[in-house]
């Protein structure tokens, strides 16, 4: 099985931790796992040696709408190029912006199951924003969406054309350990 994760970065956030944990789990099982990020930089969480790590190095944030559109069109093009090279069976995006970009990048690529992972409490977001409208449209283009909670799933069912929705809470490793690639801890942090 070939699996590609697509996320903004692998900094020290919760979505990044879950991405690293899942990638490590499947790499240990012998799957071909790639993590693709928009941003370059050091990874906060330790990755299994078999995880292939790729960065688009396209984290620039343009100052106006036209520059933002141009940057996102370039990200979609580069993501599509990586998808054609890696040829994953499944491409899993993490967070709303990555979900939208994956939906556009996989248009016409029926050989890839595209799964979005919605990790935001959507009722608090402005519905009229450009990204809100893009989310509503693009989620119907993904094969499936994973939501963290049943409330998020219900919102997605009511407000997007998502075809298949399931709830999967955050993954954790047991026993709990905090192994960071460049962190302060091996088992617990003191503040």
Image (cartoon, helix red, strand yellow):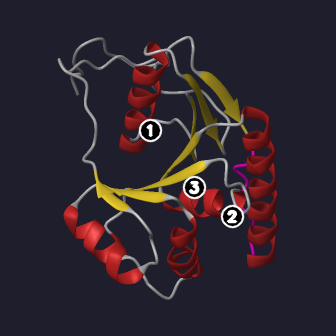
Q: Residue at x 30, y 76 (%)?
A: 155
Residue under numbered circle 2: 104
Is residue 49 found left or right of 59 in the rendered image? left
Residue under numbered circle 1: 16
Decide which of tag 2 and tag 3 comes sooner along the chain. 3
Q: Give the range drawn in magenta.
A: 57-64
Q: Can the viewer see residue 30?
A: yes
Q: Quadrant of the N terminus?
A: top right
Q: Position of residue 128 (x, y in %)?
A: 50, 88
Look at the image and say whether residue 63 sits in the magenta stretch: yes
Q: Are marks 1 and 3 in contact (CB under 8 Å)?
A: no
Q: Is residue 167 above or below residue 135?
A: above
Label 1 Cα crowd, 10 Å radius (few <14 / some 14-19 / many 20+): many
Q: Is residue 94 above or below residue 152?
A: above
Tell me, for residue 101, which label it has, or none: none
Q: Are marks 2 and 3 in contact (CB under 8 Å)?
A: no
Q: Which residue is drawn at 74% across and 77% down?
A: 65
Q: In which quarter of the image is the C terminus?
A: top left
Which of label 2 and label 1 is nearer to you? 2
Is residue 179 found left or right of 137 in the rendered image? left
Residue under numbered circle 3: 98
């Amino acid at each position: 099985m070939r699996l590609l994760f697509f996320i903004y970065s692998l900094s020290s956030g919760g979505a990044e931790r879950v991405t690293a944990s899942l990638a490590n789990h499947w790499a240990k099982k012998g799957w071909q796992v790639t993590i693709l990020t928009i941003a370059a930089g050091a990874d906060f969480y330790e990755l299994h040696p078999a995880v292939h790590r790729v960065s688009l190095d396209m984290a620039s944030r343009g100052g106006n709408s036209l520059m933002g559109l141009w940057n996102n069109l370039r990200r979609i093009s580069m993501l599509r190029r990586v998808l054609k090279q890696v040829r994953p069976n499944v491409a899993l995006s993490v967070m709303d912006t990555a979900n939208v970009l994956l939906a556009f990048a996989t248009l016409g690529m029926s050989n890839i199951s595209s799964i979005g992972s919605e990790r935001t409490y959507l009722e608090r977001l402005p519905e009229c924003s450009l990204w809100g409208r893009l989310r509503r449209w693009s989620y119907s283009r993904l094969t499936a969406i994973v939501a963290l909670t049943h409330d998020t799933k219900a919102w997605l069912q009511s407000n997007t054309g998502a075809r298949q929705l399931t709830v999967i809470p955050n993954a954790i490793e047991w026993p709990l350990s905090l192994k960071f690639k460049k962190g302060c801890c091996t088992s617990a942090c003191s503040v």
